[in-house]
Image (spheres, rainbow, N blue to C red):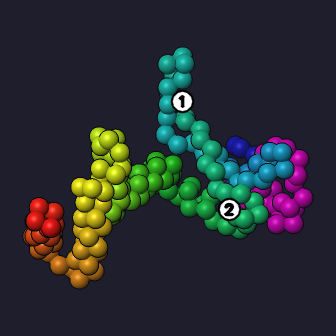
Amino acid sequence: MPKKAIELKDHEVKKLKANGRFAVGGVDGLYLQVTNGYRSWVLCVAIGHRTNQKGITVVKRTAIGLGAYPEISLKKARIDALDYRQQIKQGIDPLEEKRKAKQQEAQSKAKQKTFKDCATIYLANKEAEFENTQSILHNGTQHLLRMFIQLWGICQSLKLHQQLLWKLCSKLYLQKKVQQLFG
């Protein structure tokens, strides 16, 4: 049977300053890791299995970082460690869940790009095709883009249909071309 760590109190944890991993008790596998004066919480757990170099299936041991001490208190670290242990008992890999959440967040941020962001990126890429930035200004592209961005914002704030916006912009574009021709 594994040895149980003595449950340390907060004032005892504050005194731990030497480099190393110190079991703080309360939750199996919870340690305060001290490296060159920087202190952080680590939960050491066994999640799933892996195959070692000899081809033998063994338990996969993982260290999960819970945050820096004293920003994360001893009490909070114990609560978080218990939550992770319960997830592991239910067959959930908390690190994989974190990765999925980050990936979903990145995907949702990518979907939240505004038209202005996309148009700016597009123009920056197309700028190399033009001889210089003056030719973009002469074509009126920047002006039309600014008008379109303003209209897009108005349509989004008023929740107008996008087809209406496209019709309006095409009319503005034609008006601009007519002004350039007969101007």
Outermost top residue? 54
Neighbour tally class for label 1: few under 14, some 14-19, many 20 plus, Cα within 10 Å: few
Q: Who is closer to the viewer here, 25 or 120? A: 120
Q: Earlier in the sequence, mark 1 or mark 2?
A: 1
Q: Is residue 30 magenta?
A: no
For the residue labelled by badge 2, is the local secondary structure a helix, a strand or a loop?
A: helix
Q: Residue at x 31, y 57 (%)?
A: 137
Q: Residue at x 55, y 36 (%)?
A: 60
Relative to residue 63, is residue 151 drawn left or right?
A: left
Quadrant in the picture for the C terminus? bottom left
The label shown at residue 47 is none
Outermost bottom residue? 158
The label shown at residue 77 is 2
Q: Who is closer to the viewer here, 9 or 108? A: 108
Q: Residue at x 55, y 35 (%)?
A: 59
Q: Residue at x 29, y 73 (%)?
A: 150
Relative to residue 17, is residue 103 drawn left or right?
A: left
Q: Who is closer to the viewer here, 13 or 132? A: 132
Relative to residue 86, is residue 131 drawn left or right?
A: left
The label shown at residue 58 is 1
Q: Is residue 10 magenta?
A: yes
Q: Is residue 27 visible?
A: no
Q: Is residue 104 above or below residue 161?
A: above
Residue 27 locus on image (x, y percent): 68, 57
Q: Which residues are magenta?
A: 6-28
Residue 153 locus on image (x, y percent): 29, 74
For the residue labelled by badge 1, is the local secondary structure a helix, a strand or a loop?
A: strand
Residue 66 locus on image (x, y percent): 64, 56
